[in-house]
Image (cartoon, helix red, strand yellow):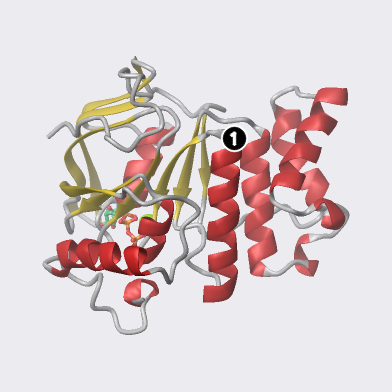
Amino acid sequence: MTLSAPAQSRTTTKFIPLLRLQGVTKRFLNSRHNTTAVEWLSFDVYEGEFVCIVGPSGGGKSTLLNLIAGLDAPDEGQVLFEGEAVRRSGPERVVVFQEPALIPWLNVRQNVEFGLKLRKVHGVELRARVDRALELVHLRSFERAYSHELSGGMKQRVQLARALAVKPRMLLMDEPFAALDAQTRDGLQLELQAIWADMGTTILFVTHNVREAVVLADRVLVMTPSPGRLKSEIPVPLPRPRSIDSHAVVDLAAQVRAELQHEVGVSNEPGGADAR
Ligand SMILES: Nc1ncnc2c1ncn2[C@@H]1O[C@H](COP(=O)(O)OP(=O)(O)OP(=O)(O)O)[C@@H](O)[C@H]1O
Ligand SMILES: [Mg+2]
């Protein structure tokens, strides 16, 4: 199934997808038996879109992001970025992980600088990019702080700044707010909506939390349990910014949850991140 260009996308005039998956399958050999992590995945993402992926634990979501990031290769099918097969990682596709892995002996600013220096960005350009990224995540006043002085939410904002400073064409976010308390997560969702509106970076965002998906996405892709396939696509035609407690968000989240209810171990986890 190749999913069509979304009616709600800001970029419906652009019909060449930034990302195209064609029949992507990935298997792993796990302690002497084969696991098919994702199977026959085909979908498109258009420039400027915000697409969320929800699915059961172990359903291949991180595997999918790794394939798009070029950190792993499919066994079958193709991942195309701007029409070219993805063969390796690159600055145009940057991953933001659930656990922010900051370098403890570098302060916030130096952590954001680190990846840019590796990419030979120096001098005025380096300073300007880091300033802008820290401003976007509201961390200018903490630029000299070290990792152990930061809250979980602040660490995640540093990781986001580090990714944004690279100016990727696509941000790949793997449950980036899952480890945070609800209040911090709500704040970061609002910030991310504002950053996305400001920068226009295309975002592919994996989450267990269906309300989070509805707050953030132009459309939500629902995956099946292992092996991960696409079950359905739910457009989110709601005006932004969206509040996690608005009736429209709650109603649409119920629709996404109903799609997941047939799937094992996701929406029925008591107290799980997707519970609300
Ligand atoms: N590097 C690997 N080596 C072997 N098996 C792997 C590897 N990465 C993932 N798998 C397997 O692939 C399947 C999908 O895992 P994946 O981490 O992609 O799921 P997920 O949807 O991200 O789960 P979660 O929601 O819990 O993060 C699992 O069965 C897992 O054991
Ligand atoms: Mg995962």
> Is residue 115 toward the left or the right of residue 171 in the image?
right
| Residue closest to the eye, 183 or 252 | 252
**Taking 251 as reference, is 45 above or below it?**
above
Quarter, ligand 1: bottom left
Please say if 101 is above or below 265.
above
Residue 13 screen position, x and y as percent = 35, 20
Residue 99 visible within the image: no
Give the camera-side residue of 45 and 24.
45
Of 87 and 157, nearer the camera is 157
Crowd tier of the residue under label 1, counting other residues whose Cα lies within 10 Å: few below 14, some 14–19, many 20 or above: few
Q: Residue at x 36, y 52 (%)?
A: 238
Label 1: state its secondary structure.
Answer: helix
**Residue 222 point in image, percent of width and height:** 23, 53
- Quadrant of the drawing holding the N terminus: top left
Residue at 27% over, 35% down? 7
Residue lying at 42% horizontally and 48% vertically, measured from the top left: 205
- Place residue 214 in its image quadrant: bottom left
Image quarter hosting the C terminus: bottom left
Name the side, left or right, on which 205 lies relative to 190. Answer: left
Q: Which residue is mark 1?
A: 199
Compared to 104, does 201 lie above or below? above
Residue 72 is situated, as x and y percent measured from the top left of the image, at 37, 36
Q: Residue furthest bottom?
A: 270
On the image, the x and y values in percent for residue 232 come to 16, 49
Question: Residue flagged by tag 1: what amino acid is it?
Answer: Met
123 lies left or right of 234: right
